[in-house]
Amino acid sequence: MKLFGYFRSSAAFRVRIALNLKGLTYEDAFIHLRRGDQRGADFLAVNPQGLVPALEIDEDTLIQSMAIAEYLEETHPQPPLLPVDPPGRARVRALAAIVACDIHPINNLRVLRYLSRPLGHDQAAIETWYNHWIATGFEAFERLLTGDRNTGEFCHGDRPGLADIALVPQIVNSERYRLDLSPYPTIARIYASCMNLDAFAAAHPNNQPDRDD
Amino acid sequence: MKLFGYFRSSAAFRVRIALNLKGLTYEDAFIHLRRGDQRGADFLAVNPQGLVPALEIDEDTLIQSMAIAEYLEETHPQPPLLPVDPPGRARVRALAAIVACDIHPINNLRVLRYLSRPLGHDQAAIETWYNHWIATGFEAFERLLTGDRNTGEFCHGDRPGLADIALVPQIVNSERYRLDLSPYPTIARIYASCMNLDAFAAAHPNNQPDRDD
């Protein structure tokens, strides 16, 4: 397996965690997003969407981090990233989607760049935008955690899963925008539990070979 | 089952299609997004995220359209919304995610409103924004369709599935922004195939009882 990623990409970080939790080893291919590698012909041949991650497995190239995580779950069921009961699975997928659909894409590099140019906003306005969507999403996420007895040491029970895989990279990304986690004590507690695990710690941007900041 | 939706919500439209394809009947609860029903205490008790759709089934309330569709697939497997082979399932989920993660959330009502206020952009700038993200996503989507022999009458083979469920509401939504589908002939062809099916046609915003435009 070869993972096309970038140390700072939240979506690639999710896949690194999933691979680590499943105990799978992989080869790295580094796509430097700030230098524009994702728009080069070589990478567009891998992923026409020009985004990381992409995961090459045999003849298949998988894209979209959540689709990749579901694939890993189906092909390597142990340890599971989703509970067995359909309502529980729906809850975990919904929590993951709050981050993967309703926070991260709006705050992604390409969107923040569009706000800067052509729209002409300064860094302060971009930070306000960023933190607005984080707060909107995390307030709901926190309420969904505190209001449900399925919340355990992790988002759902006492085993890390798909919701934690989505949540942790978003928090790490937010640190660059000075996110204060104190309004979200359950999120903060779960984040600490995750970062105690090797699978999460090894996947952290700071521990990637392509780190250059 | 009770579906909390809004005629014009693309995400609620997805769930209406999935329910129709599965042959499931449901009760409607209308949340008028432009009047702000989604921010009322009644609805926030149903979905703390304040977004539609939400689907009440027995004691469970499911949120996030893609998580709801996966739940319906798991609890009512026939007819299937996903193929059986893991790479095929990953492909369909990835196509769906291109719309559900990388187009729709960036062009959602709440984001367009933020561009208007506080950011102060006029309708022309908002339309340019909207069409930029549509074009970026649809160009990749079209290339992923034309470059793969699994593409059939629908996005994956000759049966409508999760990718079609995500794609069609995005196209309908885009009509309000005068989207020209001619650069995307495969998307246009699949859209026509879908709209020939009762499950899609009955779910169209124009055919919802809460339509008020």
Image (cartoon, coloured by chain):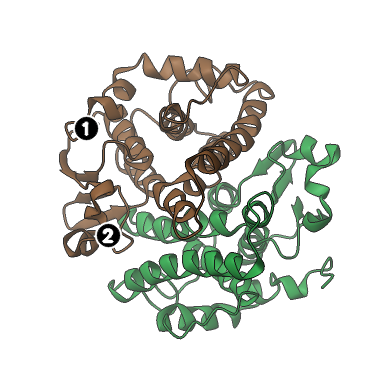
Chain colours: A green, B brown
Q: Position of residue B125 (x, y in %)?
A: 55, 43
Query: Mark 2 falls on what kind of element?
Result: loop
Q: How many tags in the picture?
A: 2
Which numbered circle lies on residue A48? none
Closer to the camera in the image, A93 or B99: B99
With respect to residue B155, does A156 lie above or below? Answer: below
Per the image, the residue denoted by label 1 is B211
Q: Position of residue B52 (x, y in %)?
A: 30, 49
Q: Position of residue A94 (x, y in %)?
A: 40, 56
The residue that appears at 79% across and 43% down in the rendered structure is A39
Report the chain holding disc 2. B
Per the image, the residue denoted by label 2 is B47
Which quadrant holds residue B142?
top right
- Crowding at dot 1, Cα within 10 Å, few <14 / some 14-19 / many 20+, comes out as few
In which quadrant is the C terminus of chain B drawn? top left
The residue that appears at 35% across and 27% down in the rendered structure is B79
The residue that appears at 24% across and 56% down in the rendered structure is B61
In which quadrant is the N terminus of chain B drawn? top left
Query: Mark 1 falls on what kind of element?
Result: loop
Asked if marks 2 and 1 touch (Cβ < 8 Å), the reply is no
Residue A29 visible at all = yes
With respect to residue B34, does A88 lie above or below? Answer: below
Q: Are marks 2 and 1 on the same chain?
A: yes
Q: Along the polypeptide, which appears first: circle 2 or circle 1?
A: 2
